[in-house]
Amino acid sequence: MAIVKLEKIKNLMDISKAAELLLEKNEKEISFSINFKTKDNEIVFCDAFVVYHNVVLGPAKGGIRVDENVSLEETRRLAKIMTYKNALTELPFGGGKSGIKIPNQNIDELTRINIFKEYVHMIREELFLEQYIPAPDLGSDPFDMAVIYGELHKPECVTGKPVKIGGLPGRLEATGRSVATSTRLFTEEIMKTKLEDLKLAIQGFGNVGRWTAYFLNQWGAKIVAISDIYGGIYNEKGFDIEKLFQYAPTKNITISDYPDAEKITNEDLLEMDVDILIPCATGGVINEKNAERLRCKVIIEGANDPVTEEADEILEKKGIVVLPDFLCNSGGVIASYIEWRNAKSGNQTEKEETFSEIDKKIIKCFHKIRETKEKLKISYRVSATYIAVKFLIEAMHERRWL
């Protein structure tokens, strides 16, 4: 994984042994099994995990990943990323994550509802007391969050809900918004050029990928390649993203058969000669096996953990700049904070206000990362980690943990 090791940060600041221990260990890990009988007398078995990495800033916050490859190790890694993401954006949340391992994603709606009801049943106290506040992640969606809300009847216990039951306008697009804003900032302030003068490729056309593409296209970007799990498409003239939305209105419809485009593989897309590559699918897609073959100039991490630690080192030697995930995709948790805050106060927020608040946070964090990078002569990832670790240690002192 491309989480910067504390050894690197210790070369830049003093980190006591106690602080190091508190940043490295997980505060709580819960493993349980979701079991029930369906109407067809079949037994459903799903392993599930909840991890709190560090909660010095507030309750554990992080989405529910639903996938056949979910594991405790992956949940630990993603909870740690959430700790840094919340610290970097200075949100009052700790780092948390949960996962449900569903071997077969083609389950009927009733079975899915029962899986989430049983999930709530197994960790009801954690959720009701807001020790852990879930949200959608890979494989889960607002309707799953509605099931959790329906079991708890407490709107601040879960974020990412549908708008009509207390969700936030703009929450669906929020992660894509922050990825797009990060891309535009890097283009204008670091590359000193305009989006329309560059070629972009986006891996993934689920929630994050499609909204990243949407906003970038609205701002004039030329997106020449896009892919989903079934394959990708290429058009040197760039795609009209609104037409792609019409062709594939949901993530369950593939874009790989889109007309007037050349078919490519996901591997082709990653290794394409473009200015900016934006991986928005899943973790570890850029690794030691393919990093040497990448030809892009910049990688904007839209997915969680798309670049492995080994690949990060290779890319740095090649001169390929990487803007880290816990800046770029933090729009989701920023919007979740707004939704959580509104649920507690009774306030309401318009969609454009949501986007404005996300943009302000991203711009502020981007400038801090850039200034620290230039001052200490380090990478963007190390700079972002440095800022997050410093904030966490200061908070631990203020709470008398240290």
Image: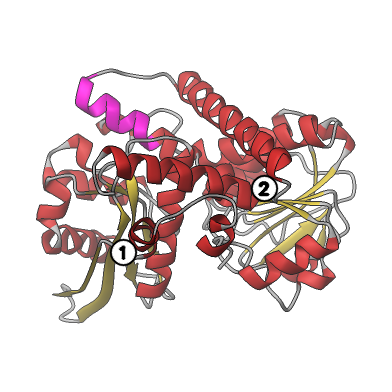
Q: Element at badge 1?
A: loop
State the mark number for residue 48: none
Total of numbered circles in the picture? Answer: 2
In x, y percent, where is residue 201?
76, 52
Q: Nearer the viewer, residue 161 or 197?
A: 197
Tell me the residue at 60%/62% (across/down): 306
Neighbours of disc 2 within 10 Å: few (<14), some (14-19), many (20+): many
> x%, y% of residue 270?
76, 63
Whether the magenta-drawn stretch holds residue 214 is answered as no
Question: Please, is residue 23 above or below residue 134 in the view?
Answer: below
Coloring scheme used: secondary structure
Q: Which residue is mark 2?
A: 380
Residue 345 forms part of the magenta stretch: yes
Q: Which residues are magenta?
A: 336-346
Could you tell me if the residues under marks 2 and 1 are in contact, i.e. CB atoms within 8 Å? no
Front-most of residues 163 and 4: 4
Placement of 272 over or under 172, stated as above or below: below
Residue occupying image coordinates x 26% and y 61%: 27
Q: Amino acid at mark 2?
A: Tyr
Residue at mark 1: 26
Q: Position of residue 94 (x, y in %)?
A: 32, 47
- Helix, strand or loop status at disc 2: helix
Residue depicted at 34% across the width and 40% down the height? 395
At label 1, the amino acid type is: Asn
* Quarter of image, res 156: top left
How far, Cα to Cα, is label 2 from label 1? 25 Å
Residue 269 appears anywhere in the view: no
Q: Where residue 165 appears, x then y in whole percent? A: 25, 33
- Characterize the local packing of mark 1: few (<14), some (14-19) or many (20 or more) Cα atoms within 10 angstroms: some
State whether the magenta stretch is mostly helix, strand or loop. Answer: helix
Q: Nearer the viewer, residue 284 or 35?
A: 284
